């Protein structure tokens, strides 16, 4: 067991990186859950419209994550080798690329947002009208577009700071943002303290304001510490990035960037397949994902911590230490999620009762939560394996491991089962989730073989 369990010093080091990320993600997802409950108290149509709009925004958010991650594998290793000019140039690459990506995303959502939302809405039912749900979704989406650029810049700064081991500042920025969001949601959704009752519009306005608050906080914090955070000193004097580095980021990072885009589109496509079962399924999945996201912060934060710690070890050339540390981190993540998954199973029949919706939606939500809880340790291993392979710059492998598997296996199965099999939604959902067991086997082999043990900045 010594191969899988570290000493006290090891866990103190891991938790010093992971806990601030967990706190930030935990508070963010907890507040997102409160927001969802508030909108769910207004009505099922409003909740479903916002859920579909957020599914589209999820694609954008993950694309942002892919872009900063593609460059971030260089940032972490540059910092590990004490090359501050390399960190600065990586930061500039993020600024230019994410500004272009965000502008493109805004244009796409403005031109085709309504059509994209309509793809998820099938047939009026006892839980709501398709037309009303569509209008709520469009209204929410168009306001949310205002907050896309500040969100992108928050991710640019937060990712660079984390690559340098500075995880507390992004956490504080996130906490400030979610407190702002929570208060404004309560005030604007329900019309408290003399404010008008805005419902879905109020939820969007509150989120946009919180995005600006987070951006201003983290940018201000970083620039005030330019003597310590050397990379930010003179970062905007020029946006020029050496061509050699651009090519290296694109060669190593493009598969990762494309992977995140295709993975997020794949998740949206899976949800669209499930949506053919009706509005009640969309509402049930929304409730399930809300509570699951709060519990998923453990394996998500451990994945981020793993990429930072292993990336720095690889950049410093400590290959054997990286291999030993990675094994212990994966074991810690999976073990933690066995405990969290058990707690989520206990919550599965209780959480849906909070929502102002039908018994059908509550019953579906409860079962979706139960299934997600059972597969949580599987997701923990997959996430850790993905970040392990990625930390060594093996982004081509991660592309086929992640997005490739989804589009070649998960989506075709979901498409066929949802449209041609006649199986109930719960059976289809379980079968699609079970495919990840195959992916686990592939991930285990790749991690065990050590294909990721590679220094990309020396």
Image (cartoon, rainbow, N blue to C red):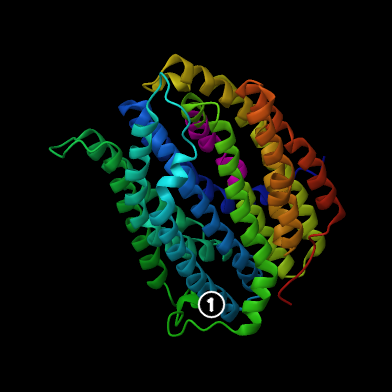
- What residue lies at 30% left-to-right and 38% top-to-bottom? 200
Q: Where is residue 413 in the image (x, y as percent from the top left)?
A: 71, 35
Up-down: is 354 above or below 252?
above
Which of the two residues, 162 or 198, is positioned nearer the viewer here?
Answer: 198
Q: Which residue carries the number 1 mark?
A: 88
User: Splitting the image into 4 quarters, where does residue 440 fall?
Assistant: top right
Residue 329 seen by the camera: no
Up-down: is 2 above or below 281?
below
What element does badge 1 sit on? Answer: helix
Residue 82 seen by the camera: yes
Q: What stretch is highlighted in magenta?
A: 286-300
Up-down: is 157 above or below 412?
below
Furthest residue toward left: 194
Furthest residue toward right: 449
Is 292 one of the magenta-colored residues?
yes
Question: Magenta segment, principal secondary structure?
Answer: helix
Q: In which quarter of the image is the C terminus?
A: bottom right
Q: Position of residue 343 (x, y in %)?
A: 58, 25
- What residue lies at 44% left-to-right and 58% top-to-bottom? 108
Q: Where is residue 370 in the image (x, y as percent from the top left)?
A: 60, 23
Q: Where is residue 202 in the image (x, y as percent from the top left)?
A: 27, 42
- What residue lies at 43% left-to-right and 76% top-to-bottom? 226
């Amino acid at each position: 067991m010594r191969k899988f369990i570290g000493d006290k010093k090891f866990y103190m080091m891991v938790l010093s990186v992971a806990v601030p990320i967990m706190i930030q993600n935990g508070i963010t997802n907890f507040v997102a859950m409160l927001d969802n409950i508030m909108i769910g108290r207004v009505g099922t149509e409003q909740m479903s419209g916002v859920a579909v709009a957020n599914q589209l925004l999820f694609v954008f958010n993950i694309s942002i994550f892919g872009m900063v991650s593609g460059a971030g594998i260089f940032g972490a290793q540059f910092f590990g080798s004490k090359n501050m000019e390399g960190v600065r140039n990586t930061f500039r690459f993020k600024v230019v690329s994410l500004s272009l990506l965000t502008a493109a995303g805004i244009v796409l959502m403005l031109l085709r947002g309504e059509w994209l939302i309509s793809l998820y809405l099938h047939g009026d039912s006892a839980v709501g009208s398709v037309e009303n749900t569509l209008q709520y979704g469009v209204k929410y989406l168009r306001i949310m577009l205002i907050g896309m650029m500040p969100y992108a810049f928050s991710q640019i700064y937060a990712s660079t700071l984390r690559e340098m081991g500075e995880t507390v500042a992004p956490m504080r920025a996130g906490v400030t943002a979610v407190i702002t969001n929570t208060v404004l949601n309560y005030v604007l959704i329900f019309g408290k303290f003399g404010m008008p009752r805005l419902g879905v519009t109020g939820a969007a306005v509150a989120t946009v304001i919180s995005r600006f608050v987070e951006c201003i906080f983290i940018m201000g914090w970083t620039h005030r510490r330019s003597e310590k955070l050397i990379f930010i000193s003179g970062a905007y004097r020029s946006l020029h990035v050496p061509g050699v580095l651009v090519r290296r980021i694109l060669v190593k990072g493009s598969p990762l960037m494309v992977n995140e885009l295709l993975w997020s589109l794949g998740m949206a496509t899976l949800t669209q397949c499930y949506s053919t079962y009706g509005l009640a399924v969309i509402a049930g999945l929304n409730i399930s994902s809300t509570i699951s996201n709060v519990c998923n912060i453990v394996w998500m934060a451990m994945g981020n911590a793993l990429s930072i710690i292993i990336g720095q070890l690889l950049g410093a050339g400590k290959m054997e230490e990286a291999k030993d540390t990675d094994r212990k981190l994966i074991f810690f993540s999976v073990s933690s999620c066995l405990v969290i998954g058990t707690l989520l199973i206990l919550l599965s029949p209780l959480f849906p009762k909070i929502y102002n919706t039908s018994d059908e939606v509550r019953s579906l939500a409860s079962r979706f939560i139960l299934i997600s809880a059972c597969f949580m340790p599987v997701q923990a291993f997959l996430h850790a394996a993905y970040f392990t392979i990625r930390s060594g710059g093996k982004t081509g492998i991660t592309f086929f491991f992640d997005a490739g598997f989804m589009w070649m296996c998960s989506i075709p199965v979901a498409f066929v089962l949802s449209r041609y099999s006649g199986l109930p939604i719960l059976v289809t959902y379980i079968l699609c989730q079970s495919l990840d067991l195959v992916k686990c086997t592939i991930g285990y082999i790749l991690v065990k073989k050590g294909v990721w043990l590679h220094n990309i900045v020396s």
